[in-house]
Amino acid sequence: MLNIADTLHLWCREARPFVLATVVGVHGSAPLPVGTSVAVDEDGEAVGSISGGCVEAAVYELCRQVLRDRSAPQRAWFGYSDEDAFAVGLTCGGELDVLVQRIDPAAQPHLCTALSEIDRGRPVAVAQVVDGPERLLGSTLSVLGGDHAAHGRVDGGSANRAVADQARALLRAGRTARVDIGGEADGYPEHLSVLVHVHASRPRLLVFGAVDFAAALSQAGRFLGYRVTVCDARPVFATTARFPHADEVVVDWPHRYLERAEVDERTAVCVLTHDVKFDIPLLRLALDLPVAYVGAMGSRRTHEERLRLLREEGVTEDGLARLRSPIGLDLGARTPEETAVSITAEIIAQANQGSGRPLTQVTGPIHRPPRLTSYR
């Protein structure tokens, strides 16, 4: 849904009914993740893609049918087809489970509000029932990041509370995921499977050290969607002119800035100073924070000395095991730009539990499911 949020917002503002086809399950290798959608309006205009082209025509026709017949939400399954090159199937070998439903914006005003918030870049979670009792299939509920209040309705009392709680948890984590609800733990007797679409604030990339490598890394980080901060204690080097791609440039001692910075489990910390007076207090703090990635630049000799000093400062072996140093993947990088690719590649691999090895040397699906796929 979020891949076409701008168009959906426009259609909702115009009170234009449409059909939404959303990937609610992926098995094996598939080109696009759970939560990706196609939408078709009453004029036949289509936006989005759910397969990179493999099954778009069949999904389009199904959307037109649901819109024309005003029928109840439908589930469709698309799998691998090799007997007929023109049959409807995924040539990548995966399987898609798709929910197709008609949306009347006038009947679900909370969706227009949620899409408006997304258009403004604000955090939002939209929960969509994708499996369960037929009367609830396709129903939606949204949680806005500002007040975390729930809007819309899935079902009465306990179901609404359970779905809203899961939506808030995923909004905090910044991840779209499918969750199961129902049973004694949730206080709701019926089983529901809910897809929570999350538009989160941008994850943070904190780059310490106003060096050439930081300039290239800030550009790469911004390209990947991070909110980039460059921090250095030396005002002559920490300037916006030197780091035009950073969202902010801070002049402060690195550890002092990190003490007050807002971080979460998506934050990446990159220490490029390779100066003991900056590195040790900064890394001691960073390795104790719930961030996604902590990396530090330097030679292997520098790394060994760094480990010795951090142990003297009381950092545990578990904490030291989190440190990525020397920073980055082995790409043979030499220039600042190549090094930035090496670092960001390691950040991506760690976030997605990738091996960092060439795909020619790896077996199994190319497209892996997200690391967090359910919350209980």
Image (tube, rainbow, N blue to C red):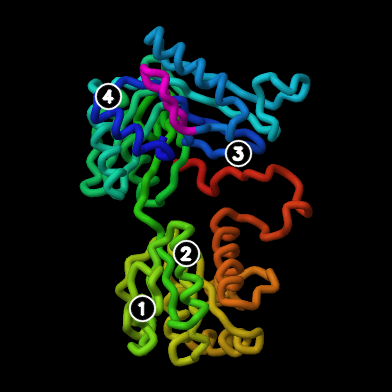
Q: Quadrant of residue 25?
A: top right
Q: Mark 3 is on which residue type?
A: Pro
Residue drawn 37% across and 45% down?
Answer: 199
Q: Earlier in the sequence, mark 1 or mark 3?
A: 3
Q: Mark 4 is on which residue type?
A: Pro
Q: Earlier in the sequence, mark 4 or mark 2?
A: 4
- Magenta residues span 37-48
Residue drawn 63% across and 85% down?
Answer: 299
Give the labeled residue for mark 2: 221
- For marks 2 and 3, give the CA distance: 23 Å
Residue found at the far top of this picture: 69
Q: Main secondary structure of the magenta part?
A: strand
Q: Mark 4: few, some, or many residues within 10 Å (few <14, many ≥20)?
A: many
- For marks 4 and 2, give the CA distance: 36 Å
- Residue 263 image position (x, y, % from top left): 37, 65
- Residue 198 image position (x, y, % from top left): 39, 43
Q: Mark 2: few, some, or many residues within 10 Å (few <14, many ≥20)?
A: many
Tell me: 305 left or right of 363.
left
In this picture, is 90 found above or below 120? Answer: above
Give the labeled residue for mark 1: 241
As for residue 39 lying within the magenta part, the answer is yes
Quarter of the picture containing the N terminus is top left
**Mark seen at residue 18:** none
As for residue 110 lying within the magenta part, the answer is no
Give the labeled residue for mark 4: 105
Give the labeled residue for mark 3: 31
Q: Mark 1 is on which residue type?
A: Ala
- For marks 2 and 1, give the CA distance: 17 Å
